[in-house]
Amino acid sequence: MPLVFHAVSPTGPACRHRPRRCGTLVAAAMAMAVKMAVVLVSAAATAEEPPAPPPDAARIGQLIEQLGSPQFAQREAATRGLVESGRTAIGPLGEAIAGDDLEVSSRAIEIVRGFLASDDPDLAAEAEKFLESAAEGPNQTVSQLADDTLDFHMLGMAEAAREKLESLGAVVAEGFLPNGRRGLQVVLNSSWRGSTEELRLLSRLRGVAQLGVHGVRLDRAALAVLGRMRTMERLELYGTGASDEELAALEKKLPEARIDVRKGGKLGVGGQPTIGPCLITHVQDGSAAAKAGVQIGDIVLEIDGEPVANFEALTGKVARHGPGDALQVEIERVTPGGPERITRTIQLDGW
């Protein structure tokens, strides 16, 4: 809006008798007009000023380096700057924790911990992945710090994770384990409709004692999630496609858990695990065993020419085979005429 100034002559009729007062009023009016102009110009400049651009890579690099400064004030200033940088800083922070400076690593993890509570779900998800990766790193101190940070974060998210997993087909239930202890049991099978990304929700559940993954493919990232479930006592991996190397790494992370690994072939029978002989006490309807004519009460003597001492041995031999593999099974069956030996070729199903 243009400003119009009206000059009043001090010699006009109104001022002819009070020149000093008129001069004072004119000066005050002009001063007020100047002030208004300054305010309006300042406001216009502020409204049109563009937002400050995010820090570039060089600036973020400087801030990360400053995290290791010997001066506390500089470390604090760098922390604030990286927090304000948001998602732009996550990648460089990941590289920073791989270094040898524990001060830098711990501050980087603390910065990302703050991102977990962000209102931006994408930023929170990236922060969670960052900490998961850090927890798998070679530096044990940093790895433990990231792991503890994740555990604390997950503590308040267990119920929502359970609801989401169940909506995707996971079976989650409280129950008693063979050792008599009560714990959470989870099974992922052919009903599972989730993605590898959603498998990460498993680590948010509290007190999982038994987990069965039957016929669900697991990549390295999913196996890393299982490796953080320290409360597990039993882990069943049937037909997951995990390599021997990946399974060996998982066993190191879960030394207290009994891990039952099978390539995915399913016979479809049940029995007493360690009591010999290998007596069949259950045959699943429609299973490979049922189709081959196996019956309750049969005793499995051999598989592919190898003796079978008990049901656990049977399980171990079947575990070495995948869906579609054919096994030569020798059975002893009690008949009215006495024991009868029967040989069957059984093509395994898949979990």
Image (cartoon, helix red, strand yellow):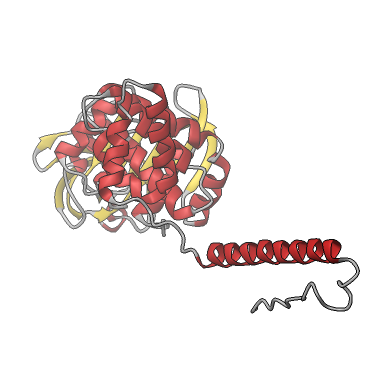
Look at the picture and state if 254 lies above or below 84.
Answer: above
Q: Nearer the viewer, residue 91 or 44?
A: 44
Q: Which of 228 and 13 is in front in this view?
A: 13
Q: Nearer the viewer, residue 343 or 87?
A: 87
- Relative to 296, 11 lies left or right: right
Examine the rendering and report whether any part of residue 280 can be seen: no
Q: Position of residue 133 (x, y in %)?
A: 30, 39
Residue that appears at 49% across and 35% down:
153
Residue that appears at 29% across and 23% down:
102
Residue that protrudes farthest toward the left in the picture: 305
Examine the rendering and report whether any part of residue 80 can be seen: yes
Q: Which of 100 and 184 is in front in this view?
A: 100
- Relative to 180, 266 lies left or right: left
- Relative to 146, 45 lies left or right: right
Residue that appears at 32% across and 20% down:
70
Residue that appears at 73% across and 76% down:
7
Q: How many marks?
A: 0
Q: Position of residue 205 (x, y in %)?
A: 49, 38
Look at the picture and state if 247 lies above or below 324.
Answer: above
Q: Position of residue 216 (x, y in %)?
A: 32, 52
Quadrant holding the N terminus: bottom right
Residue 112 lies in quadrant:
top left
Q: Where is residue 130 in the image (x, y as percent from the top left)?
A: 34, 42
